[in-house]
């Protein structure tokens, strides 16, 4: 059986999944878990959504000619 590929499907970027480790304070984990429960999604799915939205917003801010910030660890 042949699979038909539409133009809209060709334009979508490939999504690459990577495993990352997050070290978050317990208070943040609890807040994320409660938010995920309210949305009726898994904690992992909710964290992915939050990360995607944050990245999208940061890309928007960069397009708005604001300068990037350097984050350092102490």
Image (spheres, rainbow, N blue to C red):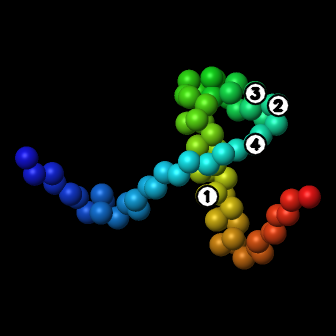
Identify the residue position indicated by label 1 in the image.
Answer: 56
The residue under the point 81% across, 69% down is: 70
Image quadrant assignment for residue 25: top right
For the point 23% across and 58% down, which residue is it?
A: 6
In terms of secondary structure, where does tag 4 sit? loop
Tell which tag, 1 or 2, sits nearer the viewer: 2
Residue 49 relative to residue 71: left or right:
left
Dot 4 or dot 1: first in sequence order is 4
Report which residue position mark 3 lands on: 30
Disc sitting over residue 27 in the figure: 2
User: Within 10 angstroms of label 3, few (less than 14), some, or many (20 or more) residues?
Assistant: few
Locate the C terminus and report the quarter of the image it occupies: bottom right
Q: Quadrant of residue 26?
A: top right
Residue 60 location in percent, x, y?
65, 65
Disc 3 from disc 1: Cα separation = 24 Å
Viewer-nearest of discs 3 and 1: 3
- Mark 3 in CB contact with mark 2 (< 8 angstroms): yes
Between the residue at mark 1 and the residue at mark 2, the CA separation in whole angstroms equals 24 Å
How far apart in space, not on screen, are marks 4 and 3 (Cα)? 13 Å
Q: Secondary structure at mark 3?
A: helix
Camera-near label (4 vs 3) is: 4
Q: Earlier in the sequence, mark 1 or mark 2?
A: 2
């Amino acid at each position: 059986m042949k699979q038909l590929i539409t133009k809209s499907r060709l334009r979508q970027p490939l999504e690459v999944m990577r495993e990352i480790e997050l070290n978050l304070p317990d208070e943040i984990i609890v807040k994320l878990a409660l938010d995920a429960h309210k949305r009726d999604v898994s904690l992992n799915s909710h964290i992915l959504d939050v990360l995607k939205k944050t990245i999208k917003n940061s890309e928007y801010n960069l397009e708005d000619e604001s300068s990037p910030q350097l984050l350092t660890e102490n």
